[in-house]
Image (cartoon, grey):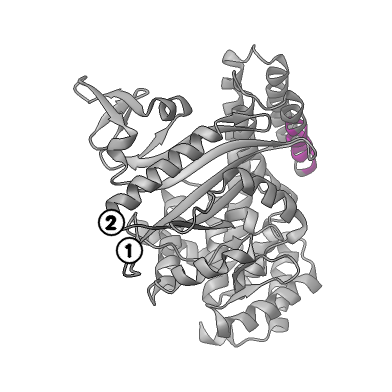
Amino acid sequence: MEDQNNQAPAADLRCILESAQRLGVEMDEEEALQWLTAIAASRAALGQVVVDPSSGVFGHRVSMLDFDSADLAYFRQVGRLVEFADEPPFVETALALSGSAAQSRIQTHPGDLDYFERVNIKAATREEACRILSRLMRDKALNTISGETYRLIEAKFGNYPCDVVRDERLMKKGVPIAWKPEEIRDGKITATQPDGTPVTITWEEVSADPGWCKLDWVVADPVRASVANASNMLDVTWESPDGTITPLDGYLDPYFQEVYLEADSIPIFSKLVRHMSNDALDNYVAQLEREVAKYLTKDVNYGKAAKRMYNIFRLTGRYQEAAYLRELFDEPAAMLYQVWALIRTVEEASMPGATIALDAVLAQTDELILAVTRALEGEKEVEIVRYLLRLRDSVAAYGKRGAEFSQVEAARQEVINLVNNFFYEKLTAIPAIRAYMEERMQTAL
């Protein structure tokens, strides 16, 4: 590993270009060399946070190399919908982009808009902090259930206190609860225990153990003529009167994949990250490696595995492999990874009762079709386009959806298979990446 880290960027690039050329992957040589030089220089200051003075965004040095500020105004616009407001002096927040939105320089067509927000609550007791969070979450959900350009899909808050059957599915005790908008309004969920006994779970009841807190919306942008899923995952901490910081879910998330949208958030960010353990990076990489193993063996998805391997490689000094993976997400066929996510978004946006303008949904469907025609040729293109045209017809009918949406599952599965085949072929063709995948698969056995 150490020998690899000491190679000059130019030498790294020669190896990458040879592999890419052999596999038909187009690479911008100048851009790749700039990235390799910058990432190698960052190795000496891996934990350093940098601020872009022109835009005011900040984040981990490695993450900032992949962020493109071209869509920053749009990200901030959606951020105003999903963010939680400060309530001085008791609630302070810091909103960031995460996932593919934070890597917009290499993932030019993110299927989702993923946000991450640190919410620090100052309170006398943990119980009081949980009550404040309960109010914040419910108020946010109720205030953003629907509007002209958005609709709340669900909110994750609390864990099931016992095994329950809900919507004909068994939910095990301790699993995060996904609340539908109408259930949030009512403040309760009605379900049954496995033996058929009715059970009611209240929002107030689960607030003492909030667990994984996350909200999901579908949002439309009339100017861009697009729809997307937007989510905000919260990392909530309780600050006691003596200044002790305690994560309410038991884990303080690291900051290695986040781009914070406002420089004003630096004070709270700095205060919280001081409480991270010294082995936060190692723990983060280990978590990603477990996810890679899952997507290679259990929930097979080579696109998701590739995304996580990219983060692992760029943080652990495997820059040749990381630079190669960067290019895969700029390939036409990789665009199908985003199309797969967008199919779900179009479904959500066009369900009965949706408030999002029909024109935006139809325009997004047209974009899906164009993306497929750009990426594919022959019978596969014809087949997937046929399914997407059926989807468009169903959306246009707006009220005659019914069974038509079941046809979309076939298109989704085709896209999944195409994406998996594309990434599997390109990943396993590089010996070092293939060896790493085999190693991770062995750990899953």
Asked whether 127 or 378 is in front, the reply is 127
Find the magenta span and give its range. Answer: 364-374
Q: Does the magenta stretch mainly form a helix, a strand or a loop?
A: helix
Residue 277's x, y, as percent?
Answer: 37, 73
Asked whether 436 or 89 is in front, the reply is 89
What's the residue at 58%, 53% (across, down)? 424
Q: Is residue 336 above or below residue 120?
A: above
- What kind of residue is marked 2? Thr
Image-based side of 290 in relation to 333, left or right: left
Q: Which mark is residue 125?
A: 2
What's the residue at 32%, 63% (across, down)? 240
Q: Is residue 8 above or below residue 403?
A: below
Determine which residue is flagged by label 1: 240
* Residue 345, quarter of the rendered image: top right
What's the residue at 36%, 57% (across, down)? 444
Examine the rendering and report whether any part of residue 377 can be seen: no
Image-based side of 137 in relation to 354, left or right: left
Residue 199's x, y, as percent?
Answer: 24, 24
Examine the rendering and report whether any part of residue 427 can be seen: yes
- What kind of residue is marked 1? Ser
